[in-house]
């Protein structure tokens, strides 16, 4: 029988893969003014969060905040043209991965994604705590 942590890790791995596929499909096939620039940016922080949770399945206080700060750091590095500073401007993969242009709207999308994660965690752990109290 799988332990609770192993079930959580497996669940987060599945979520990470599915969201990563969704992100790739959005990047390749969606060329609109809403889903690609806004939903894609909000989803990327969820991908990062779920990837971290594969390796650290127990609750980490403020993890959505830490993911947000990381995303903002990457966005600020775009302002300083990190891709060019690293000499990777000729590599399409790294231009897409690290981004090439700073946009304040991206930070707002990261914030929306991380806020959603924070709300989800609050509801999930509140439910788990209530369930645990009822069983005990």
Image (tube, rainbow, N blue to C red):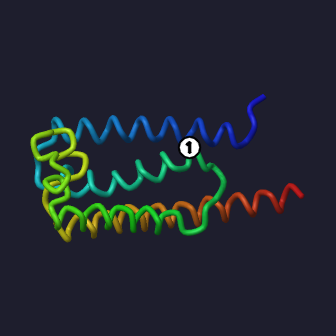
Numbered-mark total: 1
16 shown above or below 56: above
Between 76 and 106, the one nearer to me in the picture: 76
| Residue that protrudes farthest toward the right in the picture | 136
- Can you tell which quarter of the image residue 9 is in? top right
The residue shown at (25%, 63%) is 75
13 relative to 86 in the view: left or right: right
Give the x, y percent position of residue 53: 55, 49
Query: Which quarter shows the C terminus?
Result: bottom right
68 relative to 6 in the view: left or right: left
Residue that carries the numbered disc 1 in the rendered image: 54
The residue shown at (27%, 70%) is 108
Query: Which quarter shows the N terminus?
Result: top right
The residue shown at (17%, 53%) is 83
10 relative to 47 in the view: left or right: right
- Can you tell which quarter of the image residue 12 is in? top right
Give the x, y percent position of residue 69: 39, 68
73 relative to 17 in the view: left or right: left
Between 74 and 24, the one nearer to me in the picture: 74
Give the x, y percent position of residue 87: 15, 48
62 shown above or below 53: below
Between 55 and 21, the one nearer to me in the picture: 55
**Crowding near the residue tagged with mark 1, few <14, some 14–19, many ≥20 C-alpha atoms within 10 Å:** many
What is the secondary structure assignment of the residue under circle 1? helix
The residue shown at (71%, 58%) is 128
| Residue that protrudes farthest toward the top in the picture | 1
């Amino acid at each position: 029988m799988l332990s609770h942590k192993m079930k959580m890790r497996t669940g987060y791995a599945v979520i990470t893969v599915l969201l990563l596929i969704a992100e790739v499909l959005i990047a390749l096939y969606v060329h609109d003014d809403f889903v690609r620039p806004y939903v894609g940016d909000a989803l990327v922080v969820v991908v990062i969060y779920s990837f971290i949770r594969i390796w650290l399945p127990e609750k980490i206080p403020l993890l959505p905040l830490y993911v947000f700060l990381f995303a903002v750091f990457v966005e600020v590095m775009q302002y300083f043209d990190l891709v060019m500073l690293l000499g990777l401007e000729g590599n399409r993969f790294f231009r897409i991965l690290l981004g090439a242009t700073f946009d304040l709207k991206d930070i707002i999308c990261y914030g929306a994604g991380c806020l959603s994660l924070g709300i989800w965690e609050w509801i999930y752990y509140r439910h788990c705590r209530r369930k645990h109290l009822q069983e005990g």
